Image (spheres, rainbow, N blue to C red):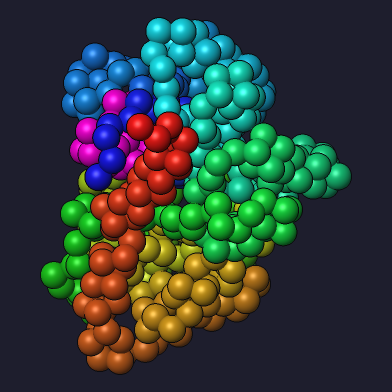
Amino acid sequence: MPAPFSIAFLTHEPFYPPSGGGSAEAVYLVQEMVRRGHAVHVFGPQIDDAETVAKKFGVRLHQFTRWPMGRYAKLRNFKYLAYPFFLERMVAAAARTTKFELLFSQHAISAVAAGKLKKQLRVPVLMNFPDLLTGFMETWPSYVAPKPLVQALMRYELSLPGRYEVDGVGAISDEFAGRLAARGYPRERICPIYYGYDAQAFPLRAQLPPAARPPVVVMHGSFDAHHLGEIAFGAVKTVVAQKPGTIFRFVGRRTAGLEKFLQRAQTLSNFKFEAAGFTPYAEVSRQLASANVGIVPYEESAGTHCAFVAKIVEYVATGLPVVCTPLNSVRGYFQKDPLVKFSKFDGEDFGRQIMAWLAEPVSQWQPYAASSAARVRAELDWLPLCRKAVDFAEKICSASRPVT
């Protein structure tokens, strides 16, 4: 193991507690860095009880306090555009008293600041991309996100590593790595990390839900626009028409997107749902364990094709049969998994796949649940993934250190 490094960790999301989506990864990456003895400075939005958090994780927090930041903050997108300007100055100010040996940016928004700081501070930069952020905008209405603008933003995001000649890139998936390479960034400098889960928080369920109870189809997450579109609605419509007692369970904050979807779905006769609201990460697995099928009805976009979706990993870890749209990122990994069915990008077909799971005898898939869960536990738990990521970061740091 190399001598400890001083690392500036840049993020646009509150560090702790994780707010959903890609934010959870930051905590596990930082824990692995600190475990190896590195001095980690986290630059990000202001959080509650910062002193306790800094002590808990063994880091120094540099907090952005000009305005609230977060996944559910008002005017979020405008704040994201302005944030890199201030983040760059925060890090530059701290660098006057602390010599950083690596800038590690989390997500594209902080990558903008890290790229601009590279030449200014003469420090190696690793840009980690837990998603293709602007790629999700392809599913937004054109009056909100005109297609030419979205394409320009995606080109800009994918150009960041080459534009700033950074030293390495962490990629959410092989699909994302391929898109970066197609933009001319050297493939050997890209490390596909994937997106993981906390194996302790998602154990294999001990028992199946009672057969006499109405089936439960579950989905958890942040419920953004690309999660609950025409595919999700078409799937619900298909299922309730064929199996009226089915309950659709939504585990997560009741966002505007979820509320709009529920209002629409309630126009269907026989639609039944549960939506309790925000659920702490450690309690999500209980909601999955008592379900019959987990779903990932993502609309098609560059963002969803690049995303290594945590939902599908957590469903399989729990031993839950899954239906997912054919996203390039996860299809390559799970295409032979007996617990996963891939639909077309079509709501009716997605609904048919749900019905296929509900009709399939448990004896046909249950014997494979333990082995499927063991595979993701061995390969996609945060511990092995973060070891891989920090190994990559240490390699970049070591290459930049003068030989003594």
Residue appearing at x 47%, y 35% in the figure: 400
Q: Position of residue 46 (x, y in %)?
A: 40, 16
Q: Which residues are magenta?
A: 26-40
> Looking at the figure, which quarter contains the N terminus?
top left
Residue appearing at x 65%, y 38% in the figure: 165
Q: Nearer the viewer, residue 400 or 303?
A: 400
Q: Nearer the viewer, residue 14 or 142?
A: 14
Q: Quadrant of residue 27?
A: top left
Residue appearing at x 41%, y 46% in the figure: 395
Q: Position of residue 293 (x, y in %)?
A: 37, 71
Is residue 216 found left or right of 34 in the rendered image? right
The answer to whether residue 329 is visible is yes
Depicted 74 relative to depicted 268: above or below:
above
Residue appearing at x 61%, y 30% in the figure: 115
Q: Looking at the image, which residue sits at the far left?
A: 206
Q: Position of residue 163 (x, y in %)?
A: 71, 37
Q: Looking at the image, which residue sits at the far right?
A: 148
Depicted 294 relative to depicted 287: above or below:
below
Inspect the magenta stretch and tell me whether residue 115 lies in it: no
> Looking at the figure, which quarter contains the C terminus?
top left
